[in-house]
Image (cartoon, rainbow, N blue to C red):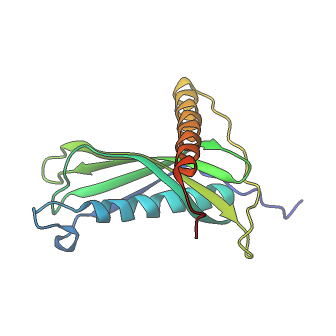
Amino acid sequence: MSNDITPVRPREITLRFLAEPTDVNFGGKVHGGAVMKWIGQAGYACAVGWSGYYCVTVYIGGIRFYKPIFIGQIVEVKAMVVHTGNSSMHIAIDVSATEPKTGARKRTTRCLIVFVAVDNAGDTVKVPGWTPVSEDDQRFEQYAIHMAALRKEQEDELQATETTPPV
């Protein structure tokens, strides 16, 4: 009998929050900064759970706010690995809000975050690979790959406009 334990690598995680008065902006709705904080927390938990290492955010993109979130709603932030590189993990984030009295639920926000796994010295480490299985998985992965190519183009364009070396 072996004492080896094979770690479970959950591909997704869901965190839930109650939208509280301290999360609200002057317009009476949960402000984007609070939503982005929840997105970061869910993405981080997903990346660490998948990789088994401390992870750092290297990119957040395509963030789209669809609907407002109101005080008292239950906010659900679902984070899911949709592509892995050598040390990177692309995490799709989907945020929804539910009115607890009625059960009415709406999608409020979506985005893609890229995390990199690092060791104690801050050097990148290899992460377990993820292979898409379903058609939905394949579409998610293709989206992540497409977004990576667009990021590369944007970075190249930005560097071409720089006249002084970055600090």
Q: Please state the horizontal and vertical placement of residue 134, each as a whole percent of the image.
A: 58, 27
From the viewer's perspective, is 103 left or right of 120?
A: left
Q: Nearer the viewer, residue 91 or 164?
A: 164
Q: Which residue in the rendered view is the most extreme toward the top?
A: 135
Q: Residue at x 59, y 42 (%)?
A: 152
Which quadrant of the structure image shows residue 35? bottom left
Number of marks:
0
Is residue 133 depicted above or below 129 in this figure?
A: above
Quadrant housing the N terminus = bottom right
Q: Residue at x 45, y 61 (%)?
A: 40
Farthest residue, direction left: 27
Where residue 3 appears, x then y in whole percent? 85, 64
- The residue sitting at 57% across, 30% down in the picture is 142
View extreme (right): residue: 1
Q: Is residue 38 visible?
A: yes
127 up-or-down from 38: above or below: above
Q: What residue is shown at x 68% (from left), y 41% (from top)?
A: 130
Which residue occupies the foreground of this view, 8 or 130? 130
The quadrant of the image that shows the C terminus is bottom right
Residue 156 x %, y % = 59, 44
- In percent of width and height, residue 25 lies at 16, 66
Instruction: Using residue 88 as the reference point, say whether residue 105 is left or right of it.
Output: left
